[in-house]
Amino acid sequence: QGDFLRTVAYWNLGVSLIAQGKDDEGEDLLEQATRISLDSGNILVAVMVLCNLADQHRKHGHLYQAARLYNQGLDLAVDFEGRHLPVAGQVWIGIGYLEGEWNNLDLAVNHIEKGISLIEGWGNVAAIDGYLNLSRIHMMREDYEAAYSAQLKARALAELFDVTEIDDLFVDLQQARLWLAEGNYSAINQWVDERGLRVQEVGPELLNEGTHIHPQVWKS
């Protein structure tokens, strides 16, 4: 029990430090949490922390390091008969994101859909992330019908399991990305006004996800 509590403490503190922009300190704690959970045989926590670490490498553009960590998590997330546990869904979603970055879009869709099928009903936040990533990949394929469908499923889950407002904001951001990709600037500007946001706050977040629209489209 002591190892478990120490793992959770390091994990929570690591995530908190990363949220504050202290990535190096946060990642060090996540690595410690991974080691302790693996040494104590807590596979479930180890896989989730590995996903957090992989997400950090992904954020910094270290895609191959992220892939190595995701694959490590995938190897761990199996039962005694070699079947993937539900937590493996979080890993597949992360791997699907990477395939999207490498422009393997069909493979990305397959991996993310597999991840959602494993995680949905077990980890709702991860399922929301899965649907949002799926929407992003369909948008890259210019399949906007499928992109909107995935985004709506993410919204339904976010509303059903209203844990934090962050999930709702991520869903809204994906909606805005879809409007931006389609050139529906009036809808974006209305959304910005309704939320009381500034274009300078929202524009970079939308553009960071690979929507190749010049920032000058935003109203001043």
Image: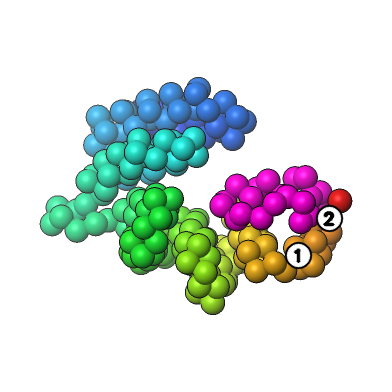
Q: Going 42% across and 35% down the picture, which residue do you hit?
A: 62
Q: Residue furthest bottom?
A: 145
Q: Residue furthest right?
A: 220
Residue type pointed to by label 1? Tyr
In 3D space, how far apart are the residues under numbered discs 1 and 2 (Cα atoms)? Answer: 9 Å
Q: Residues within 10 Å of mark 2 (few under 14, many from 20)?
A: few
Residue nearer the viewer, 75 or 182: 182
Where residue 90 appears, x then y in whole percent?
38, 53
The correct choice, above or below, for 84 with respect to 14 in the image is below
Where residue 34 appears, x then y in whole percent?
34, 32
Find the magenta span and give its range.
Answer: 197-219
Q: Going 43% across and 50% down the picture, which residue do you hit?
A: 101
Q: Which quarter of the rendering shows the N terminus? A: top left
Residue 219 got which mark? Answer: 2
Residue hosting label 1: 185
Looking at the rendered structure, the secondary structure element under dot 2 is loop
Q: Decide if residue 198 is in sight here.
A: yes
The correct choice, above or below, for 159 with respect to 53 in the image is below
Residue type pointed to by label 2? Lys
Specify whether residue 214 is painted magenta.
Answer: yes
Q: Residues within 10 Å of mark 1 (few under 14, many from 20)?
A: some
Q: Going 34% across and 55% down the picture, which residue do you hit?
A: 92
Looking at the image, do the residues carrying marks 1 and 2 touch, with CB atoms under 8 Å apart?
yes
Q: Is 155 on the left or on the right of 107, as rendered? A: right
Residue 157 sits in which quadrant? bottom right
Residue 144 sits in which quadrant? bottom right
